Structure formats: structure tokens, C-alpha cells
Amino acid sequence: MLIPHDTRIALDVVVDLVNTAPDGGQPEGGPPVDGLADIEALYAFAARHRVSGVRELDGKDLRAVHDVRARFAEVFAAADARVAASLVNALVAAAGTTPQLSNHDGYDWHVHYFAPDASLADHLAADCGMALAFIIVAGETERLRRCEAPDCRRAFVDLSRNRSRRYCSSRTCGNRLHVAAYRARRREAAG
Ligand SMILES: [Zn+2]
Ligand SMILES: [Zn+2]
């Protein structure tokens, strides 16, 4: 599946956003923490993903982003494309999109879906919503996954050729399970 560069970036943003939720499960099995617990964390998130046009943020922005995050989590949990599509439609409509071509800051031409004066929550809803729309339109909704490792429910987008990825990260969850399976085999062999 060929994914435009800016869509790919927006997918990274939405995966990271969903995984800041305390119910996403932690890969190291630690206690649940909210990765967007305060306004400081929200600024850091926007900076990490170089979200353009971010103005002063307050408690209202934080609540709005938490709300959008919960809606995106539902998309990753959607049973099929029909459910995912209606969730994305609602998110994008509420954000009031106005597609605009832009080549700001030395980037190539790309489409901004968020309205020029959009809040951070609306910006994320519009651009990440359209990136998910791209996946749904491509008939690839099943690539929007949750990690299969026990006590890890982190979201990820499976971009593997044969849609075979099962874990949020092969380094953490995949490897952890691999090691556990190896030890179990050793125990069996020894017993
Ligand atoms: Zn841009
Ligand atoms: Zn995981």
C-alpha cells in the first residue's frame, strides 16, 4: 500500500496520541499513566510532532484533546470499516475541515485539512481523521490494530506487506513474548 508522506506523518501522530491514554497499557507492564496529563505535556506532544499553528493552550484544549483521543481510540477498536467510517466522519465534521494546499517551512506541497484558526484538538481531529480516512478508503481498516501482547493494548498501524504484524513493537512486546516462549520450551525440554 502506497501511503503519501504527510498521511504517514499524521498516522504516527494519531498512534502516539491514542497511546498517551492511561488505558492503552504500558509495554513494560508498569502502572497506567496519562501521557497527556497536563498542559505542559500537551505542548510537548505538539512540539514532538511539529504540529503547525499551535497557539496558547489551556485547560479547555487539554479536555478537548482528551475527548478527541478517546474518539480515535474507538476507531482503533472498531469492528469493521463501517463503524470506523462513521466515527471518522463525525470527528472530521465536528472539526470543520477546510482543505488547503500549503508548502510552509520548506515542506513540499501537502494538504492541511484543519481550518486556519483551528484549535489543537480540531487540528488533530481533521488531519489525523483524514489520514485514517485514507486507510479506510484503501480497504485497509484492519491495519489499524491493537498490540496482542498480554497487558499491552497499544495502538499501531500495521504497514507490513502481508498485514502480519501483531505487536506494537518487535523490540519490546514482540521480543518479550519471544523470550517467554523460548523459556517455556526450555522448561518443557528440561522436564
Ligand atoms: Zn503542514
Ligand atoms: Zn505492545
Image (cartoon, grey):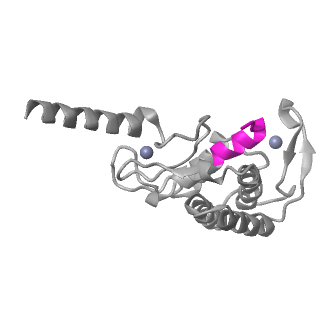
On-image quarter of the N terminus: top right
Tell me if residue 50 can be seen. Answer: no
Tell me if residue 160 can be seen. Answer: yes
Vertical position of residue 2 compared to residue 97: above or below: above
At 54% from the left and 58% from the top, the residue drawn is 38
Residue 4 magenta-drawn?
yes
How many numbered discs, if any? 0
Q: Nearer the viewer, residue 123 or 184?
A: 184
Q: Nearer the viewer, residue 7 or 103?
A: 7
Horizontal arrangement in the rendering, residue 77 relative to residue 187 (left or right): right
If the picture is divided into quarters, which one holds ligand 2? top left
The prevailing secondary structure element of the residues shown in magenta is helix
| Whole-percent x, y for residue 75 in the image | 62, 61
Of all residues, the one furthest to the left in this rendering is 191
- Name the quadrant containing residue 7: top right
On-image quarter of the C terminus: top left
Residue 113 magenta-drawn?
no
| Whole-percent x, y for residue 76 in the image | 58, 57
At 87% from the left and 32% from the top, the residue drawn is 108
| Whole-percent x, y for residue 134 in the image | 76, 50
At 59% from the left and 63% from the top, the residue drawn is 78
Vertical position of residue 176 compared to residue 55: above or below: above
At 40% from the left and 37% from the top, the residue drawn is 174
Horizontal arrangement in the rendering, residue 175 relative to residue 12 (left or right): left
Which residues are drawn in magenta?
A: 1-13
| Whole-percent x, y for residue 56 in the image | 72, 55
Horizontal arrangement in the rendering, residue 112 relative to residue 168 (left or right): right
Horizontal arrangement in the rendering, residue 166 relative to residue 15 (left or right): left
